[in-house]
Every structure is written in C-alpha cells, then in structure tokens.
Amino acid sequence: MGKDYKALFTQSENVELPQGLLGSVLVRVRLEQKKSARRELVFVGSTAVGSIIAIVPAFSYFVTSFFQSSFYQYLSLAWSEGSGALAFWKEISMSLAESLPIFSITVFLFILVVLLWSVARTTRNIKTGFLTA
C-alpha cells in the first residue's frame, strides 16, 4: 500500500497546472466568503435590531425592580449612617444581598451582551460582504 502512495506522489510532480488556476480558486473562495457573510448578515442583523428593541424594556424593568426591591433604601442607609452601619454591617450587607434584583440585572446584561455581540458581527459582515474588493 505504501508503494502505491509513493508512485502517486512521484507522478504528480510531472503534472503541469493550468495558468491562472490559483487566481480563479482564490476568486471563487472570496465569492463564497462574501455570500456567507451576506447570509449571516440577515440573521445577525435581525438579532441586532431585536436586541436594540428589547434593551429599552429590559432597562425599564431593571430600574423599576431596583427601586421596588428596597435595595436603594438599604444602600442609602449604609451610606448615610456611618457609625450605625458599621455596627450592623452584617445585617445591612445581608439585606442588600437579599434585596438585589438579580433576575432583572441578568436579563438586562444578557440583552446588552447580545446587542454588543450582534453589532460587532453585523459590522464585520457588512465589511466582509460589501466593502472589500
């Protein structure tokens, strides 16, 4: 079996490649990259638009839950009462941890990360699909 491979590779050295083959292959690869970038642009662009639309209600939900959870009141208590806050720092820190609106923070940060990711991918796909030669 090994001799067959040797014979195959020794015969391939004598083969002449057509003129311009490399150029035509590279042009075809570039066209496929552009088509792929344009297809991905549809998905990622719609994700960017959706996350732009979703960031406003997510931020509103975050702010509303922040003030409804009394987190702001516990935080202002910790800052305004210096000596009293130091005496009861464990209780105040536990109250802060319990009242933190974790779900709304998570939703807002998730949508923000999706927005940043999709905007970055959209700009890359626009550059690849339309602006490069």
Image (tube, rainbow, N blue to C red):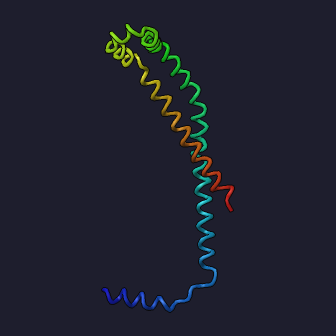
Q: How many marks?
A: 0
Which residue shows up at 42% across the image and 12% down it?
78
97 vs 66, left or right, is: left
Tell me the residue at 58%/35% (across/down): 50
128 or 37, which lies in front?
A: 128
- Residue 124, position as x, y percentages in the image: 60, 51
Residue found 47% across the figure and 29% down from its top: 107
Residue toward you, 44 or 119: 119
- Which quadrant: the N terminus? bottom left
View extreme (front): residue: 83
The quadrant in which the C terminus is found is: bottom right
* The image quarter in which residue 54 lies: top right
What is the x, y in percent for residue 102?
42, 24
For the point 44% across and 9% down, which residue is it?
77
Write down the quadrant of residue 119 in the picture.
Answer: top right
User: Residue 40, relative to residue 66: is it above or below?
Assistant: below
The reply to whether residue 37 is in sight is: yes
Q: Quadrant of residue 28?
A: bottom right
Residue 69 visible here = no
The answer to whether residue 117 is above or below residue 67 is below
At which x and y percent is residue 94? 34, 16
